[in-house]
Amino acid sequence: MKKITQTLLCIFLFSTILSADDALIECEAELFTARVPLKFDAAVERATKLGMHRQIILEATFLYYVDTENYKGIASLHTEFQNHLEKFNLDESKIFATKEQWQSVIEYSLALQALEKDDQVNFKKHITEAYWLSPETAAAFSHHITVRRNKKLMQQVTIAPDREMLTLDTEKPITFKELIKGNDALILRFWSPWNQQLDTTYPFIDSAAMQCKGKKIAFASVLLDNEEQLITNAKELIAEQKPALECQWLIDSNKKSFSKQLRVSDLPTLIIITKEGKIAYHGTASNNTFWKTLTKINPSIKKPNRNN
């Protein structure tokens, strides 16, 4: 009887260990995939209670902020990443291949803190060091340099009322004044049918177009070129879309191009223009600043929740 009891006890303890390991694995998966704030916060709380390694939780938090474009969140990670630097364990890491990549996050967070303060000297210093430590993640860092440059340049831009583009259906001229008539702002979405399938921000674009309807914010999608094949492909894609995007369809003009004046280098790029012709926003539809800008124009507009 004693042996049977001991055997049962061993089986129970072994199954408990397996259950704990399974719980950690499940929790880790949730940490690295949850992108809705409440779900991610719950995953962090659960991971902490289960005793998950703090380094893994920090890495998941960093990735969550990157995926949700929460740059203030990344900036806030500086102290914890710095404090954990000496304890960094490459074997425990889920996303970093070197210790230098961990260090690059420290410099990246300091660069973002400087950016918030409009401190150009320290921004350049820390973003350069982040590049040096982790050149393979250069694309993430260069985004902020591009945004900073564009922000300064866009402050100097004013769209003239008689500035023209072409309508997609008739290819006839239409002015900025006509596009924004009766509205407080105009959103221009620069796009191409050739990258539409790869556009992960489209659900945000669709939501913005629907929410802006009837709220004094005009929405237009602009093809970058009037090349014949591009126009044909665009029309075919628009016809296939169910439901269709709530917007006016336009083509950029070859002379005095909007996209060149507004420094559009990536697709899709969304630009919010006020009725005075000033640039209120330049970037992507998933960025929190885009939605904050729209909310300032009309408080009823909210960023949709999206769980990747």
Image: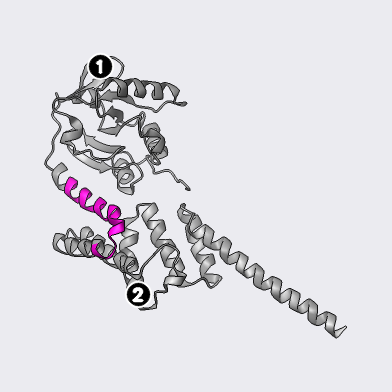
Amino acid type shown at disc 1: Glu
Q: Is residue 47 magenta?
A: no
Q: Position of residue 50 (x, y in %)?
A: 56, 70
The residue under the point 38% across, 38% down is 199
Residue positioned most to the bottom: 2
The quadrant of the picture occupied by the N terminus is bottom right
Quarter of the rendering containing residue 247: top left
Q: Is residue 149 magenta?
A: yes
Q: Position of residue 141 (x, y in %)?
A: 26, 56
Q: Callout 1: helix, strand or loop?
A: loop
Can you say whether 21 is above or below 291 in the image? below
Main SS of the magenta part reads: helix
Q: How far is disc 1 from disc 2 in space, using C-alphas?
A: 59 Å
Front-lying residue, 29 or 100: 100
The residue under the point 42% across, 38% down is 203
Check contact, mark 1 vs mark 2: CB within 8 A.
Answer: no
Q: Residues within 10 Å of mark 1 (few under 14, many from 20)?
A: few
Front-lying residue, 30 or 272: 30
Residue positioned most to the right: 1
The residue under the point 54% across, 65% down is 46
Residues rendered magenta in the picture: 132-151
Q: Position of residue 117 (x, y in %)?
A: 20, 60
**Is 57 positioned to the left or the right of 156 in the image?**
right
Q: Callout 2: helix, strand or loop?
A: helix
Q: Which residue is mark 1?
A: 171
Can you say whether 205 is above or below 131 in the image? above
Q: Which badge, 1 or 2, comes first in the chain's sequence?
A: 2
Mark count: 2
Can you say whether 129 is above or below 83 in the image? above
Q: Which residue is mark 2?
A: 85
Front-lying residue, 88 or 163: 88
Amino acid type shown at disc 2: Leu
